[in-house]
Amino acid sequence: MSMASPLVGPLGWGIFLGFFIVFIFLGFYGARWRRGDLNQLHEWALAGRRLGTFLVWFLVGADLYTAYTFVAVPSGVFASGALYFYAVPYVATVFALAAVTMPALWRWSRLRNYVTAADFVQDRFKSKLLAGFIAATGVVAEFPYIALQIVGMQAVLTIMLLGIVKNVKMVSDIALTISFIILAAFVYTSGLRGATLTAVFKDVLVFLGVIAILVAVPFVIPGGFAAAFKAATLKALPTGVSTLKSPFFITYTTLWMGSSLALYLYPHSVNGALSAESDKKLAMSTALLPIYGIALALLAMYGILVYGSPEAMKILSLFPASARGSLVIPTLAVTALPEWLAALALLGVFVGGLVPAAIMAMAQANLLVRNIIKPLHPRITPPGETRAAKWASVIFKFLALGFVFIVPATYAIWLQLLGGIIITQTLPAVFLGLVTDKLDKYSLMTGWAVGLGLGIYMFITPHKPSAMSPLYPIAGHLVFIAIIALAVNLLIVLIGTGIAMAIRRSA
Amino acid sequence: MSAKVLLKNHYYIVIIMTTETSKNIPTWRKFVAGILFVIPWVLYTLLPIYNTIQPELGGVPFFYWFQTLWLLISAILFVIGVLLLYPGKR
């Protein structure tokens, strides 16, 4: 490939780096903000449970609207079409579930000083083993999610470095490593406080970028959305452009439902929710989070919009077809916006990956220390517990980074979908546990194990549309595997509990 | 009972008072809030009713803008639901 002319000049780079320094400052400043004893796990990992409605909205928004939103969804719409708009019903419905479950979990956590969902499961079902399983599931499922964030950051660096350096891959890997060292340092010192301040910064940049592109559309894209939808229709995207093709109806519905059920089982979601100051404030900010989803919906539509911009399509054509999707938003930003604004939008996508990665690694660390290490070493002191969590969060970040350097980007996205299938299997213990303590712990373990085994088997076994696809054909319809595995899991839990009750009664 | 235990018990009572909510909420409030939370779940499953191109909005097919509009409506429904579940609480 010959050297293309640079897309981002000195002005853009200056603004990007200048504002990145502001980001770093906010991350470290977090340690001094609303000071608390950062040797206590709940102070470090939950910011002392003191965040109000406004801050929880920004924190959880930044925590949940991730590179999945900025990269994976637009990429999916760009390559496959209407099917990937399932992300919109997903983020419309998930916060109803969260507004009911999370305040309940928050009340338990406040009362008994829980930091993780596995803490709750351990107490509720009197089983350290079950809690250990739930915690391990969370740690594993989170890895590919962090990897996806890094893939998003790579996309930004690829566009920024295009035409500037010869070996884009190598320079972007170095830049990512430096960014992660900085991230690890400020998360170690500031914990969730640092993540909260940087989250507000991220959200502002993201909204600025999304709105700026929307405003620029009529000026830079001839014919606007109408022309873009027409151009995309000519490309005959496999699942439809203006509407969804009928064979994918069940796929669409199971994808949004499965994703909706999964999101608040992820450790980083729980971590964000438990940092709220009160249950009402948590419920209120959760209720308002679908509004953040409007940015997601626009970004998803930009996956179509890009077809209307000959300039953007020309840049994308410089890359292999499989790599184009993740570059859609960065490319649209540099072609549609003035350079200074494009730089801010690119930084939004870049820190849009960094902030969730920080919270994800922190949540993994809490699970490891609280629910795996502590049961094995019960004499660990609270400061010892916190120190272990801080270091674990550093290690987890670099494991995910190493993972991205070794595994190709497309696999990272696939594995993130496998993560969704895996984490959904913790639903009976966590969500049903909030409603009842009558469930039998051995049935919960069996359901979890079978659901996991079945989900992973269906994912990797050769099937239509392809092996390593999160969809599986049932009666001619592609169904999201998470839903199938969860149904089997729930069935086992309910029948097993019924049998256990019958035995106890007759005994 | 030592003073320390008393203090600790008092601390727990304060936490319980601030963390117990759902106990004293009238059933009708829970029922209406439940319906509000469920509406988007039901609506989005009725895919055939919104899987159309017309009416377009600014060149965007109905399928896209209708689902996006419902993000805003969902937020409004959820906020009303939350206000019903937490009357007069801070």
Image (tube, rainbow, N blue to C red):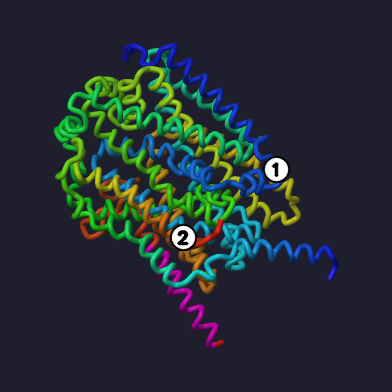
* Residue on which the image places disc 2: A100
Q: Amino acid at mark 1?
A: Gly
Is residue A260 in the magenta section? no
Q: Residues within 10 Å of mark 1 (few under 14, many from 20)?
A: some
Quadrant holding the N terminus of chain A: top left
Q: Secondary structure at mark 2?
A: helix
Q: Main secondary structure of the magenta part?
A: helix
Residue A149 percent coordinates (x, y): 45, 36
Q: Nearer the viewer, residue A499 or A306?
A: A306
Distance from the alpha carbon under mark 2 to that under mark 1: 29 Å
Identified at 49% across, 55% down, the residue is A283
**SS category of the residue bearing label 1:** loop
Residue A148 in which image quadrant: top left
Q: Is residue A235 above or below residue A294?
A: above
Q: Residue at x 52, y 58 (%)?
A: A103
Task: Give the x, y percent position of residue B53.
Answer: 16, 44
Q: Nearer the viewer, residue A13 or A485?
A: A13
Q: Which quarter shows the C terminus of chain A? A: bottom right
Classify residue A455 as left or right of residue A143: left
Q: Is residue A449 visible?
A: no
Q: Which mark is residue A36?
A: 1
Q: Which residues are magenta?
A: A487-506
